[in-house]
Image: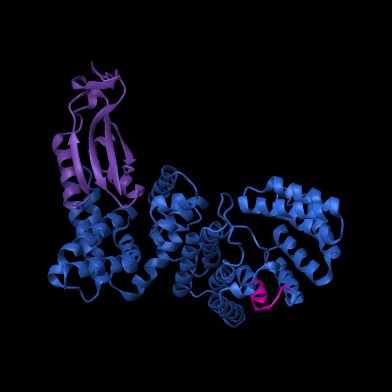
Chain colours: A blue, B purple
Amino acid sequence: MAADSIQQTIETVYEAESRRVLATLIRLLGDFDTAEEAMHDAFRAALEQWPRDGLPASPRAWLVSAGRFKAIDAARRQKRFEPLGEAGERADVAVEDQAAWADEESVADDQLRLIFTCCHPALAPEAQVALTLREVCGLTTEEIARAFLTPASTLAQRIVRAKAKIRDAKIPYEVPARADLPERLETVLRVIYLVFNEGYTASSGAQVTRHDLSAEAIRLGRLLTELLPEPEAQGLLALMLLHDSRRTARMSPEGDLILLEHQDRSLWNRDQIEEGTRLVTEALSSGSSRAESTGGGPYAIQAAIAAVHAEAATAEATDWNEIVGLYDVLMTMAPSPVVELNRAVAVAMRDGPAPGLAIVDAILARGELREYRLAYAVRAELCRRLGRTSDARAAFERALALTRQEPERRFLERRLEELSRT
Amino acid sequence: MKYLCLVYLENDKWHAVPDRECKACGEGFRDRGVLLAAEPLESIDTATTVRVRNGKTYITDGPFAETKEALAGFYLVDARDLNEAIQMASKIPPAREGSIEVRPVRELVP
């Protein structure tokens, strides 16, 4: 094969296999940094040997084995300068595991091990996100820093500290036992959803959608459901797909927000809706049929709500009764004032603005969501529909004062302007 | 991405790390194909500073730092990202005596 096309093949293999190779090398070598270095060396060796010897039958197995060899070799060389036997011990461990590493099932589990380790609850939430994006998704520190509008040096430190903690606190590289799975899975799902939301509704900055992060989160969700087809993992993937299906419709070409009821539904991505709806149906039905399953939970219910929206031809045709019912279920599973606020919107759509407003005011009266811009935006909208213009104005102004996001600010200003014209 | 790892040492620690260790580190990097250049520097007493102001060249002795760390050498490395560069920097032997400053290399704007 020509050197050019081999080079290209190696790049393709890197894209497809580097994360899996890394996940296995971490298990074999017992350390993130050693494994990363070993993987780097393995790909360099491939660049030298594959053009000469041809493509190996299983590139991934070749790379893992080359990485292992390189790590042992490096440890031996380093040993000359290390008075303590640490490097030598590391090499010995690797040799002992030799027979075990190729076992298909352990290799398949390595990626899950990596995900659960990166999302270990002993790590700070922002470290979980950074580590997952770098180690599981293969993003560079600089790419993650740009996406989160954080200085690269801050992010690099977060990753260094997280790895040190994994090493020093001896966070195990394992898939949690069945009994711990629901809780540990919840952390993983939260990390994925956080990445998705950072891409979908950036909490600050000029862009509403930073699509790369949403796409990365969907890819992660897909990987997770393949490796671990738990209903809540399916539910989260469905939720992300159903939200993402509206991506092009939720923003005007000028970058202004468009509310769900005013979106051009022909712009919604039908493939994503279809896949999302299928997944949510599966998640909700498997929850009741499989005894050992963790069951469909809050993500699956939220996805079901998104699916009801997706199947309606117009906002008016939406089955609001079904949506209110799903919010009732969600309130029993994961009660929160934000869920209650969303339920209030659905109630307003079903029964009219007054009953909806009563719920919003009750939430605000309890002192909850006092700093939450959307609570005031909802109140403003419902007051406007009831003709209570000055109340609407006050609430829009409060929402405007609380928002940090440019398109949202423009949206609220527009609503205020419209209000003064009526 | 290229990163410059700047080695800083206090004057009295200039030779605290045996040369053969630094050499081995550089060779290790070179074998792995991640090293673009690396050189150690003579001590700060040998430094000369050059400035050109209004077309005139000014040459001064120094700078002299009393106790502070001074630039003792550098490794120009090729890394996938900042974390990989930091990982390499942590392997540079003088890191345990002084400090290594990792700086991304900037592309010149044409």
Task: Report the residue at 17% width, 27% height from top.
Answer: B42
Task: Residue A231 in the image: state x and y as whole percent.
Answer: 56, 74
A232 in relation to A161, above or below: below
Quadrant in the picture for residue A336: bottom right
Nearer the observer, A80 or A225? A225
Q: Magenta includes A237?
A: no
Nearer the observer, B37 or A361? B37
Nearer the observer, B74 or A337? B74
Q: How many marks?
A: 0
Instruction: Please state, as top left, top right, bottom left or bottom right, where the C terminus of chain A lies in the image.
Output: bottom right
User: Magenta region: which residues?
Assistant: A305-315
Q: Magenta includes A313?
A: yes
In the rendered structure, the answer to whether residue B91 lies left or right of residue A416 reads left
Instruction: Please state, as top left, top right, bottom left or bottom right, where the N terminus of chain A lies in the image.
Output: bottom left
In the rendered structure, the answer to whether residue A86 lies left or right of residue A313 reads left
In the rendered structure, the answer to whether residue A323 lies left or right of residue A10 reads right
Residue placed furthest toward the front: B55
A280 in relation to A112, above or below: below
Task: Report the residue at 79% width, 56% height from top.
Answer: A379
Task: Residue A41 in the image: state x and y as whole percent.
Answer: 22, 58
Task: Report the residue at 15% width, 43% height from top.
Answer: B24
Task: Residue A351 in the image: state x and y as whole percent.
Answer: 83, 70
A289 in relation to A108, above or below: below
Nearer the observer, A372 or B20? A372
Residue A124 in view (yes/no): no
Task: Residue A205 in the image: state x and y as whole percent.
Answer: 56, 49
Task: Report the residue at 59% width, 77% height from top.
Answer: A280
Report the predominant secondary structure element of the magenta stretch.
helix
Residue A4 in view (yes/no): yes
